[in-house]
């Protein structure tokens, strides 16, 4: 059975899922297990990439976010966070280069990462850096550390395409997943994809319980 790591772009997930439900009602562990079961993969780890709002902007929102992350951590989800930042284009480029410099890459791996790294995100977005980190981890975990055979990306963001193509070119499998809203057509055209529809997500609610049908087919 192929081993899979699920990489969740939490910001993209939240902004797209909220068109259907309150994202906090959905158990991301159930979503990850559903995706792996559908493809017969062994789930190795779930990695949750999120930016942290400033406590100065809204204290209640900040502590609610921290509480949610602690809940995920208790469920075994690996949390990777960055503070929410507003950067100029120049600052963003410098930050990306700084991240590469601190990855402690070997002479063989550094050119691989650098070849796609600066194109992973659009600097005009005033990037927060967290999706860049996710893209780098996808490369590291699958190619450099060989921790998985399959990278499952929960995001509809086409900015991940360069890193995913690099991983696929090295004979690793890719699967992307997202709700219909905000799911890049280019992302779906280039890689196997799984659309998380309303009826699917309902089964991934925290409080969802399996139902059984009686002989007449009535759902209880």
Image (spheres, grey):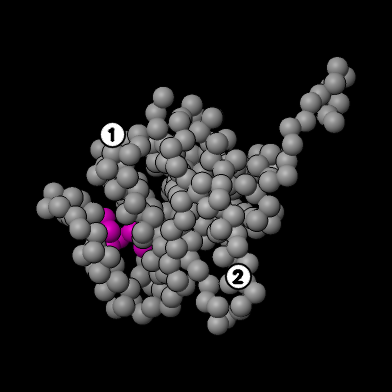
Of pointers 2 and 1, the one earlier in the residue sequence: 2
Please identify the quadrant where the N terminus is shown: top left
* Vertical relation: 75 (above or below) 82: above
Task: Tell me, for residue 155, which label it has, or none.
Answer: none
**Visible residue check, residue 34:** yes
Pinpoint residue 153: horizontal percent, then vertical percent: 45, 46
Crowdedness near tag 2: few (<14), some (14–19) or many (≥20) residues, C-alpha within 10 Å? some
Relative side of 201 to 82, left or right: right
Relative side of 199 to 166, left or right: right
Task: Tell me, for residue 171, which label it has, or none.
Answer: 1
Task: Tell me, for residue 63, which label it has, or none.
Answer: 2
- Residue sticking out furthest to the front: 74
Magenta span: predominant SS is loop
* Vertical relation: 203 (above or below) 129: above
Q: Which residues are magenta?
A: 116-121
Q: Quadrant of residue 165?
A: top left
Dots 2 and 1: beta carbons under 8 Å? no
Relative side of 49 to 210, left or right: left
Pinpoint residue 10: horizontal percent, then vertical percent: 51, 57
Helix, strand or loop at mark 1: loop
Please identify the quadrant where the C terminus is shown: top right
* x 58%, y 72%: residue: 62
**Visible residue check, residue 154:** no
* x 33%, y 39%: residue: 147
Q: CA distance from mark 2 to mark 1?
A: 42 Å
Pinpoint residue 103: horizontal percent, then vertical percent: 24, 59
* x 52%, y 61%: residue: 11
């Amino acid at each position: 059975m192929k081993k899979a790591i699920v990489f969740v772009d939490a910001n993209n997930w939240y902004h797209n899922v909220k068109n259907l439900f309150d994202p906090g009602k959905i158990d991301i562990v159930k979503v990850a297990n559903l995706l792996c079961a559908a493809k017969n993969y062994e789930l190795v780890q779930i990695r949750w990439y999120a930016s942290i709002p400033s406590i100065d902007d809204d204290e209640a929102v900040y502590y609610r976010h921290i509480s949610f992350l602690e809940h995920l951590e208790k469920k075994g989800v690996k949390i990777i966070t960055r503070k929410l930042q507003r950067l100029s284009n120049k600052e963003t480029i410098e930050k990306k280069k700084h991240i590469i410099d601190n990855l402690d890459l070997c002479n063989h791996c550094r050119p691989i990462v650098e070849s796609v790294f600066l194109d992973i995100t659009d600097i005009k977005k005033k990037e927060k850096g967290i999706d860049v980190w996710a893209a780098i981890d996808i490369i590291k975990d699958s190619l450099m550390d060989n921790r998985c055979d399959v990278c499952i990306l929960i995001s509809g963001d086409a900015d991940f395409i360069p890193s995913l193509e690099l991983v696929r070119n090295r004979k690793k499998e890719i699967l992307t997943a997202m709700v219909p809203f905000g799911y890049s057509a280019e992302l779906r055209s280039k890689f196997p994809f799984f659309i998380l529809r309303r009826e699917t997500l309902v089964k991934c609610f925290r409080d969802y319980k399996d139902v059984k049908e009686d002989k007449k087919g009535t759902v209880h």
